[in-house]
Amino acid sequence: MATINANSWEEWDLSGQKLRSLPQDLLTHARSVDLQRNKLKRVIGISRFPHLTELNLSRNKIMEFSQEMRFLNKLEILYMDHNNIRSIPEGIFPHLRMLKFVKLSTNRLAKLPSDINQCTSITYLDLSRNRLQNIQPLIGLPKLKELLVERNQLTELPFQLFQNSTCELTRCKATGNPLRCPPEEVCAGGVLDIQSYFCQMEEDPNTYSALTVKTMFLGSSMAGKSTLCRSLREGKPVTVSVKDRTEGIEISQLYTQEVRFLFWDFAGQEEYYLTHHVFITPRALVILAIDLASYSIVDPKSFKDQLWFWINNIQLRVPDSVVLLVGTHCDQCRDQEEVMEKKIDIEEKVKTMLENRKIVLKHRKKNLEESIDPSLFADQVDELDCLLEYNLKVLDLLTLDCTRSEDIAKLRSHILICLQSESVFLCSGSILPKSYEEVEQVIHTLVALEQIPQHGIILLEELSDLILNHAKLSRETLQSLLRFLLRYLHRIGVILWYEDIDVLSDRVFIQPSFLISVFKSIVRHDLVQCLEGVSRDLLMQEGALVKQKFTWVDDLRCRGTLQNVALRILVRKELEKLVVDDDDLIREVVGTKREEGIIFTLLQYFEVCLPTLVGSHHNPQAPEFISGVKQWESARQAKRDPDGACLFPMYLKDDLIVCHKWGEDKQDDINVHVYFLPEIPHSFYHRGIIKMCSLYTTYWLGRERSLFCSGNRLVLVRQRNKDEDPFIEIRCRRPEKNEEFRPLWDLVLAVMSKLLVLSRQWPGLTQQVHTPCPERGCPHFFTWRDWQELSNTNLYNLVKEEKLVCQGGHTRRTELIFPKDPALQGRS
């Protein structure tokens, strides 16, 4: 039976009632009807409600956009997302003269009705996650302010939508399309970038098609990535010695007649993985190198280390990428028969791995859909649907002998064939105005003429002046163009420009390789040896003594911290290795006792480290946790103590200090498990620690478990893996008094919120939350309903019951299982 809103007979809430048709007893003068999360396939009889101003039909099974909708001429808000609508008939939208808000995302629309632009009142339109190939019918919507068309099949956007004279758009999201005009990198900048692009196209109709492919070389240490990269670039075999192996990331370019390649060669040692997420970007070709000589068919660890780890991380970070498997060191295998055996084994295991991942996701989705009330898990089901839509393409293994010129030529030819196949690689050539090409070429010329320093760091204003001296552009044109072009070049990986970091927004890094070289002075596999090898001359420049080195090494090994003076010395040492003799630049990059340098700013921005006090577990910048407060000041934003240190969770070796402070787990602890599907990304936990440290004044950190303190309350966070299900566990001690439950749950929810924010940086990742039954030995658990969009108050009403019973029959008070304030019981 329908639930009538107590405050108004004009509002009807019929959500989540498993309706298959509209109830006949609905009052026809209703102005708002909520029918979401039902089982409607058709909307028959909706014309009986001509006074409707708001209609919510989302999350049903509707296949047809009902002709009766045209009679709702007072409708202002329409939700029809998450259905199965394939088409919208003509003659409906012209009648909806009052319609302002339309949400049609996550359907199966292949085209739009040609008369949708006659609904001139629309201000918000969400068409994301459909199958649209063009949106020309939208031209002529005079009041459209927000347009969402993500994840369709669009190759271009109509320039008429963005004409300055008529455009009302303030927001446009179009990522996840095979866009050529404008390129996705331009669209990612928003409406202003798109408008600038079309203005340039209008002023100079001469265009060029630029196929620039960022090519990332990944694989385990010594798999032959650098050999492949350099041999491809040179067009002949190049031998790379062990001492010349990649540390951090090396960047280079290759121009062919058909395409420009940006080669990013990533180091394979574990210590460098933490920074990979910064530079691994979507729409890239990944070349995954596998050492066939060391690969073992019979040892499962061999496949896991050389393929499973890498494919899984690619799938989490850039789930729509193309991965080309390349088997190296074939010349060191016994014979061709061994090579073929390993090739077949790898391809079969990769295929099984990808299929199994889909099966696991489908099972998870099915379990949620078969729950007692599936409407409570709609958001989680949507996330699983998104993961199932992603299609990582792993191409067959290409076997190579990198000592043979013909094999290098074969690899280059094979890559070009892959790029030409749209079914394999969705990144076709981008259509760009000539002015983009002209300015980019001028930048390369300035580098060649050494008017831009070798290190490539230059002020934005200075770069603008230099370009004006070489380009045939007016100052006005360049001013309107330069920022948009720099964003484009940054997104495709040609330069680096961190406009979102206030203190760096006025600088451009023309040579990303230089900045990465400085990065690796701190994030490296042999940091202890580098500290031990610091010369007395370098120490003297910072006023440090030789004996202090031993303290630095001990701090790094035992606490994962590095004193700021040691950080400055290591960066200075790397700059000297790069033959940089500019004292001003060195101070700018390294920093001084008074000011942070570029490198420290970036390390903190990318959550590699955070400031702390020497030898202390206290974070003085983090305020006291206050129950009910959603936002806290970030310690990263506070001024760093020049005599302090930076904490690098990646260098922590054990959990001894945390175990000692926490003690043993107790059966009645408040305990929440946050599961991540399909895997917890590498470095995720350590980056999560850094986010959590900004919340609490005191903390103790370990490699896989951390303890945070607010007042007299402790929160334990640790990474675990049980039955091959990776999860992060959050624990608090059970309080003695009822009024203390809410403050503890506030602490837990604060940690969960930080994990949620971080998880959104991995498009191929989703999470589910469980609370295990507190009864000793009981394997059952309580699944959390959708909570991510709920307000702080609603979170304490996830479950209304005062007591809960698990599937094993064990009864517990609700506030031990879910965020439930005992003071609210009986009021819901």
Image (spheres, grey):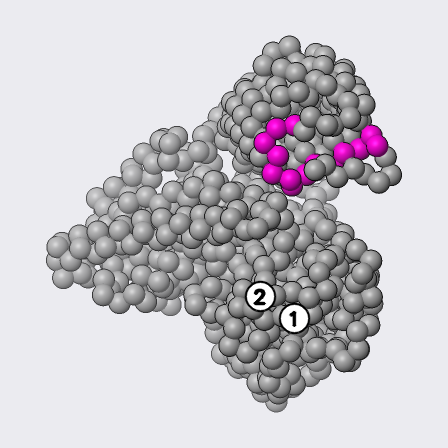
Residue drawn at x 56%, y 55% as measured from the top left: 767
Residue 16 is a magenta residue: yes
Magenta span includes 552? no
Q: Amino acid at mark 2?
A: Cys
Q: Is residue 62 above or below residue 729?
A: above
The answer to whether any part of residue 297 appears in the image is yes
Q: Quadrant of residue 92?
A: top right
Does any portion of residue 591 appear in the rendered image?
Answer: no
Q: Quadrant of residue 660?
A: bottom right
Q: Earlier in the sequence, mark 2 or mark 1?
A: 2
Q: Position of residue 525 (x, y in %)?
A: 47, 71
Given residues 526 and 753, the one toward you in this image is 753
Cβ atoms at labels 2 and 1 below 8 Å apart: yes
Q: Amino acid at mark 1?
A: Arg
Residue that label 1 marks: 812
Q: Name the secondary structure under disc 2.
A: loop
Residue 455 or residue 392, whichever sits in front: 392
Q: Which residue is labeled 2 in the image?
A: 806
Q: Residues within 10 Å of mark 1 (few under 14, many from 20)?
A: some
Specify the quadrant that holds the N terminus: top right
User: Magenta segment range?
Assistant: 9-22
Q: Main secondary structure of the magenta part?
A: loop
* Few, some or many residues within 10 Å of mark 2 (<14, 14–19, 20+): some
Q: Is residue 550 left or right of residue 327?
A: right
Q: Where residue 511 appears, x then y in whole percent?
A: 56, 49
Question: Horizontal placement of 169 versus 679: left or right?
Answer: right
Looking at this rendering, what residue extends furthest in the bottom direction? Answer: 547
Q: At 38% across and 46% down in the image, what residue appears?
A: 323
